[in-house]
Image (cartoon, grey):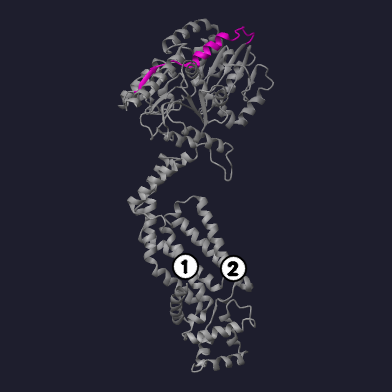
Amino acid sequence: MRILSDALGYVMYFCYYLLHNYGLAIILFTLISKIVLLPVSVWVQKNSIKMVKMQPEINRIKAKHFGDADRIADEQSQIFKREKYNPLASLIPLVVQIILLMGLVEVIYHPLDYLLHMSQDVITAFNGLAISLAGVHPESSSVQLTVVEMIKSGNYAEQFAALQSSLAGVDIASVLQQVESISLDFCGINLSWVPSEVGGIDIIVPIAAGVSAWLLCVAQNAANVIQAEQSKLNKYGMMAFSVGLSLYLGWFVPAGVALYWIASNLFAILQQYLLNWAINPKDYVDYEALEASKQELDELQSIGGRKKPFARNPYAKREKKDFKRFFSVVNKHLVFYSESSGFYKYYQGIIEWLLAHTNLTIHYITSDPEDQIFALAEKENKIRAYYIGEKKLITLMMKMDADVVVMTMPDIENFHIKRSYVRKDIEYIYIPHGMDSLNMTMRTGSMDHYDTVYCVGKHHTEEIRKTEEAYGLPPKKLIDWGYCLLDRMIEDYKKADKTPHEKKHILIAPSWQKDNIVDSCLEGMLDDLAGKGYEVVVRPHPQQVRLQQDKMDRLKERYANNPDIEIQTDFSSNSTVFEADLLVTDWSGIAYEYAFATNKPVLFVDTPMKVMNPEYQKIDTVPINIWMRDVIGDRLDPAKTEETESKVRNLLEQKDAYHDKIEKIVEEYVYNLGNSAEVGAKYIVQAVQEQIKKAKEQ
């Protein structure tokens, strides 16, 4: 450090020699240091631009391998090597500035060493005198500065006479003249003073240091190519740290050191804008691609809801344990994935058949910590249940190692859930969770990356084959399956009490979409049905209840005194859809489950269609959701709610005719009625056996 301070001392002496003002000398010294280090700053600017230029590619890697820190680090490291990028380069200016600061502190604490052109003997003598007199003048922060102040005061003639006698052959008068010529004042502040010791007007020094740091951070957040892309937390966190450090420096070190810090910050602002002018990041970075990649990554990070700062996940330990337990099992043959407990009903028939007729171990992953599968797994040793949250699921699926994976989640590969990159031969099976059109109610390409799709009926088979033809896709395995949930609903309905109601029960069950029944025409319909001899139950979609509680409360209040109308929002009732004599809905898939299980008609309200696939018309087939409305019931124009009661009455009067018509439709459009569980399970067994055989052959 002494070598550095000596070198900086010569520079400081040169600056002082030119300006004869200690404060201006420090500012000039700071400017010289910026100029000398300009090549480093240019290199850092180019390196920073290189980093931001790579960021879209890095963001997409983070999205592709979301949650897999090791894989992301490996691929990011390869990009850095390819682009010859050094991630530590941005630290170089900070490290250099700290080193300069440490050396400068030495210079400012010992100004006689560097501002006076004297021999080492003279300096040593002055240091000795300063130490001997330190107790006389203890308030000064530097013992050398004590000597300067004493010389200027003229009160210590005896001591200086002794000093002159000890320095034979030295022109002490010339030395004293040099000492007396030193001015440490700058803008009314003595640069040797430490604000924490002196107080008074010197308090402006740490304030000025803090303000300069704040200005630098504001400028960097706006203009620095890397800092501008940081999150608000990083930006303001760095700002708080920089301002805090500057306040500390300004308060506990001599004002001369703080002046260097202030000047350095201000010159850094000017330098940043000059660098941006000379080497403009916009000439190298594709900011549109960067923004798109950031949005893609942000969508993944928001899965499962934003985590509140310092909030703890109560299931984190359980998830970590289950994640480790899942991958501790080798040779997994069969895996089911469920988004929540409510999806088990779509697998139930298949799983029950597998448990009863095979020795297969079923690995059941769920993103619902309260899933009913955990209670079932406690009773059935062939079921192993795992809780994996939505974010952790991304990593688990990418590392999946199993023969067959069964899911009800569409769009695999299209969004955050990907096929395994560990095993390319896994057979992914899609099981529908509805009997209506896959083409209209699923997103474009939702089935494209499944190997096998279970089809409810011939309408599913036709849609998928024509989709493959229209888009030039390779053919998938299509299994004439049926619908296990419908089979169970039919059996349950056969056992249900069918005692006729004194008042016909009407169930209104809207879907969750824009301008659904609740939003467009519910009150007009209820007013037309009120007092006409019906018991009407409205069951809004759970999402609508959750998001529009005020609207639900107003509906309840409006019909609170009408004994024939009930608005159900707590879903705690034990009554079932089967009890209704007539179902009223818009585009909900519940219409087909109700009609096909009970053979009762449905009144469809023609609200705007629920279309998830804007390209559905490219496929040369009319979705069942559209044409079936005129076959299993009647339609109501939402603008003509005064026709509600008449249409309801007409459908109830023709229930026998509809019974026979719907029964024929079910037989024609649902595969393997009453036997879908066995068909679905047997195909899974066959798929597992083929994978085992293939592995043995290899």
Q: Which residue is mark 2?
A: 251
Q: Which residue is mark 1?
A: 99
Q: Are marks 2 and 1 in contact (CB under 8 Å)?
A: no
Q: Residue furthest front?
A: 696
Q: Residue furthest right?
A: 561
Q: Position of residue 530 (x, y in %)?
A: 63, 16
Q: Nearer the viewer, residue 236 or 616?
A: 236
Q: Is residue 683 left or right of residue 522?
A: left
Q: Which numbered disc flags the more N-terminal residue, 2 or 1?
A: 1
Q: Position of residue 436 (x, y in %)?
A: 45, 19
- Amino acid on which disc 1 is placed: Ile
Residue 286 in view, yes or no = no
- Membership of 674 in magenta stretch: no
Asked if 206 appears above or below 404 in the picture, the reply is below
- Amino acid on which disc 2 is placed: Trp
Q: Position of residue 227 (x, y in %)?
A: 45, 55
Name the quadrant containing residue 188: bottom right
CA gap between label 2 and label 1 equals 20 Å
Q: Nearer the viewer, residue 254 or 217?
A: 254
Asked if 660 appears above or below 569 in the picture, the reply is above
**Magenta extent:** 476-503
